[in-house]
Image (cartoon, rainbow, N blue to C red):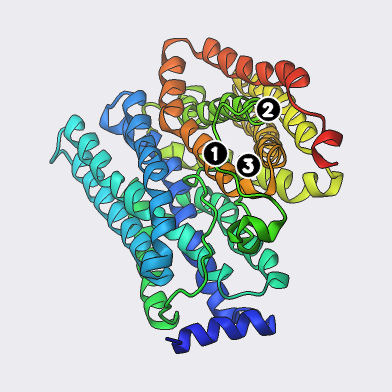
Amino acid sequence: MTTPENSESAAAIESGQKLPADRMALLFMVMLVTAAGNTAMQSVMPAIGTRLGVADFWVSLAYSWSALLWMVFAPRWARLSDRRGRKALMNLGLLGFISSFALCGLTLMAGLHGYLSAVWTMLIFALFRSLYGGLGSAGPPAVQAYVAARTSRAERTQALSMISSSFGLGTVIGPALAPLIILPYLGLPSPFFVFASFGLLVLVTLKLRLPDDTPSYAARGRLVSEPMSSAGAGEVYDADEHDSPPEATGEAATATRLSWRDARLRPWLIAGLVGGHANAMILGLVGFMLLDRLDLRATPELAAGPTGLVLMSGAFATLLAQWGLIPYLKMGPRTSTLWGMGLAAAGCVMVGFSESLNAITLGFALASLGFGLFRPGFTAGASLAVTRAEQGQVAGIVASVNGAAYIIAPAIGVALYNIAPLESFAIIIGLCMFVLVWGRRALQADEVLIR
């Protein structure tokens, strides 16, 4: 049966019309508010943990826990969006974000005011944080699928690039706003309530302004990792390319499932996993390092500004790499990966030996520039290493590798830093150098991949 919504989607596909600007702006905001909220959280959590008297390791572990849930649930929500509707999944994702942030903020306020012990504060915080990893992960795939099902192939890449860029923009906005929205009565948890309010506003607008959809196209958004301040800016998903049957692409259907151990993929996945752990480790410990290097342990409420500045510099550098250097210099996967690891190692050396805020900021920006080159490099390398018919499978494997790095690596980085600060940076630098040296021999040349 043809519904008005189906007719609307089909008409858009046939005529090549773009989605209305107001709908695109609304979908953009769904992605933006979640990314900005999460990176704002990163700016204040080290200070909150110090004020509570909780060891840095447990603070990092409490909010990196949701990365595991994100990795587990995001693929399920992506598959469900075709059956239950993309708008319904967007609503669910926003509800997960709003409820998680509001309840986490209330829990932290109770702990800071002495109504809960530090241990119970972090346990309850981790519990409510799981709402975001479990439910919030429904939003991004649904947004991308909504766009993919309502744009012609000619318009789809541009539309999805714009939507995906909201994740990258959010990683800049979050750290920038965090120190400015610490309110007198709410204190350090203020960003939790402010961004929960923003999310509620977006949710109400979404319910009122975005038409309900009855899906008629098998288009799912590519999975993205949980938003972090130096994570990728997002990826473009071409539904026509990945959801079409194998015979339509000229590839024979394969009976075997693509394995992580596939010889074509193995070098790229090893590079992605090792380099991703280096990225996640420095990202997890930088906020706690600033408390020590700037001598702010006694006055942690003053740390939100410097932490936000450093994270924002990293986000800008990541966007510069992914939106500027890679397309401008036409860097291939191997070149991008190896240059990225070299720059990341140099930036980590600078951060490890710096004492001033300016030097730390510059070093972290250089490291983030490197990681911003590395991540699209290994992603593209894995994609080009396999056939067209295997692109859907490799996208899922790459998403898992990206997510796996953020499950435990941030907490490990913090734990190592607390035991031996300089040695922890030596390990991070060592991981980068391993990929750089080993990758020169193991990764396929760009000319071989793109021929």
Pointer 1 residue? 256
Q: Mark 2 belongs to which amino acid?
A: Ala
Please give left or right for residue 123 compared with residue 202 in the image. Answer: left
Please give left or right for residue 414 compared with residue 347 in the image. Answer: left
Picture coordinates of residue 389, whole percent (x, y) = 64, 49
Pointer 2 residue? 344
**Lower sequence index among marks 1 and 2:** 1
- The residue drawn where x is 40% and y is 26% is 411
Picture coordinates of residue 409, whole percent (x, y) = 46, 26
Does residue 248 lie above or below 188 as drawn? below
Kindly give the residue lying farthest to the left in the view shown: 115
Camera-side mark, 2 or 3:
2
Kindly give the residue lying farthest to the bottom in the view shown: 4
Asked whether the beta carbons under mark 3 and mark 1 sit within 8 Å of each other, the answer is no
Residue 70 in which image quadrant? top left
Pointer 3 residue? 313
Camera-side mark, 1 or 2:
1
- The residue drawn where x is 43% and y is 60% is 139
* Label 1, label 2: how far apart the Cα atoms are: 37 Å
For the C terminus, the quadrant is top right
